Image: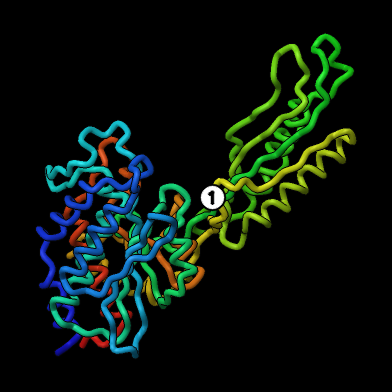
Amino acid sequence: MGQERVILAVLDAVSPDEIESLLCRLIEIEGHQDVPDQERGVAGYIAGWFRELGIECRLEEAEPNRLNVIARIPGTGSGAALLLNGHMDTVPGYGMEHAFKASRRNGRIYGRGSADMKGALAAMMLALAGFHRSGVRLDGDLLFAATVGEETYSPGAYHLAGSGISADYAIIGEPTGLRVGIAHKGVAWYEAEFPGLPVHGSVPELGINAIYRSSRWISHIQDRYLPLLKQRKHPLLGSPTLNIGMIEGGTRPVIVPGRAVVKFERRLLPGESAESALRELIATLEEVKADYPDFEGEVRIMDNFHGVPHAPMQTPPDSRLVAELLKAYRSESAGEAHAEAETPIGLQFWTDGALLQQFCADTVVCGPGSIEQAHSDEEFIETKQLLQACRMYIRSACALCGGAS
């Protein structure tokens, strides 16, 4: 039969009610940093769901007691492999009323994780189920990976990247409103430390004020370094940024401070790294010292990500993965597509896609829901987008993995 008939056979094996019910069940299983076993309950449910259907599935320990879920629809071995990926953890309920009791209202499903990102997990799980039920055999493998810890420092995706898994294409299901995200910035945290000489505040001229030293450097960052960053431009992401978020220094108003620490983050464009930015920041200290010979300070990378690099992500806009997802969007939008939605976009938030690019160069972010809903007290997802996402993943798999004809 022709490819479109094969695609329709897979699509017909998935129902909107099933996707919605699956999402509601996933929402009701808490999996966040305040739960003793974190995502373990979610992982156990997903693995059991696949095994009950007869789909190949395994659990991998990313950290002690924290399990990634890997499922696979095997191909014939002669085609490209596509990986569908999402994270199982959410943020806590915070101020959201009945956060872990899913509710359906006005074409939406409300609940913590509905948009970020259990909606995409449900759509991806049903995409695999559609191929399994229909009996359609692809040439390449269709893989699914549900990972732990994206809301903290991404140990799950980091483990996955080093686990030996292989794929030619990867789709991360973070909420993009089904737009195809091909780039985002990286992020690194730093601290600059400035020594001083503490003395009594009545004789400040006998000491060295560490806070004054830090303020000289901060002024240099504002007046000279930030303008340089603004001159760098990425066509989708704009300029790199630096934000000073914390200043710590001193012990009492009556004592000249002997130490000051400035903590800040730097957002990185593709082509930059935490290390290359560190070299630039060290140069700013040297520039201040050239103006003020008695100046002293040092800057270093903070280990807030526990050794997991948070690099930028970028996939070429002419990638076949991008083309097939955009084509799938047009097919599933039923004439409702807006012209701007048919072009790739850059994302303002970081994703696990940067880690997956360590083994899969063609990685994009495309999922149902809006990032504006993520972590909010009214988090929801449009049910219509749930089904559209699942059908887009199915169409993309047929095109990329081959053999669906």
Q: Residue at x 61, y 36 (%)?
A: 244
Query: Whole-percent x and y of residue 73?
Result: 26, 77
Q: How many marks?
A: 1
The residue that label 1 is drawn on is: 305
Q: Residue at x 32, y 34 (%)?
A: 94
Q: Quadrant of residue 67?
A: bottom left
The amino acid beneath tag 1 is: Phe
Q: Is residue 14 placed above or below 262 in the rendered structure?
A: below
Badge 1 density bin: few <14, some 14–19, many ≥20, Cα 10 Å: some
Query: Whole-percent x and y of residue 52?
Result: 16, 68
Q: Is residue 118 left or right of residue 222?
A: left
Q: Is residue 27 left or right of residue 359?
A: left
Q: Is residue 93 placed above or below 15 in the rendered structure?
A: above
Q: Residue at x 76, y 15 (%)?
A: 255
Whether residue 340 can be seen here: no
Which of 98 and 217 lies nearest the eye of the viewer? 98
Q: Quadrant of residue 254?
A: top right
**SS class of the residue under badge 1?**
loop
